[in-house]
Amino acid sequence: MTKTLYVGNLPWSATKEDLASFFADQAQVKSSRIITDPANGRSRGFGFIEVEDEDVDRVIEAMNGKDMGGREIIVNEAKPRQAKM
């Protein structure tokens, strides 16, 4: 099984490929995505990666607070999406 990790405070220029590559030394990244503003297509400064369950704690410990493109990233387990009312 995989788990989704939230990655915040990303550099505005980061791509999903950059994100996957940045985490590749810690775990096999199953998927990555950068969240963009639908109005203008620009990054909203955060994204998500999927890694194997057994890698979650190690990845968070190793990568939370790391510098990526001059910004200190935030890494934690993603919270489930809230249903829209």
Image (tube, rainbow, N blue to C red):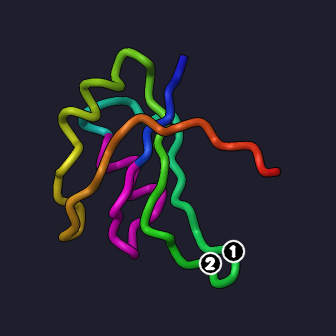
- Residue 54 circle label: none
Q: Where is residue 46 in the image (x, y as percent from the top left)?
A: 44, 60
Residue type, label 2: Gly
Residue 45 pos. (x, y %)? 43, 67
Q: What residue type is labelled 1?
A: Pro
81 or 18, which is in the foreground? 81
In the displayed structure, does residue 80 sit left or right of residue 3?
A: right
Front residue of 23 and 76 = 76
Q: Which residue is drawn at 43% across and 18% down?
A: 53
Q: Is 72 left or right of 46, judged from the image as shown?
A: left
The residue to which callout 2 is attached is 41
The magenta-colored residue range is: 7-23
Percent coordinates x, y for residue 74 in the rendering: 29, 51
Question: Where does label 1 land, which residue?
Answer: 38
x 82%, y 51%: residue: 85
Would you say residue 13 sits in the magenta stretch? Answer: yes
Q: In which quarter of the image is residue 63?
A: top left
Label 1 crowd bin: few (<14), some (14–19), many (20+), radius 10 Å = few
Splitting the image into 4 quarters, where does residue 6 fall? Answer: top left
Q: Which residue is drawn at 39% across and 75% down?
A: 12
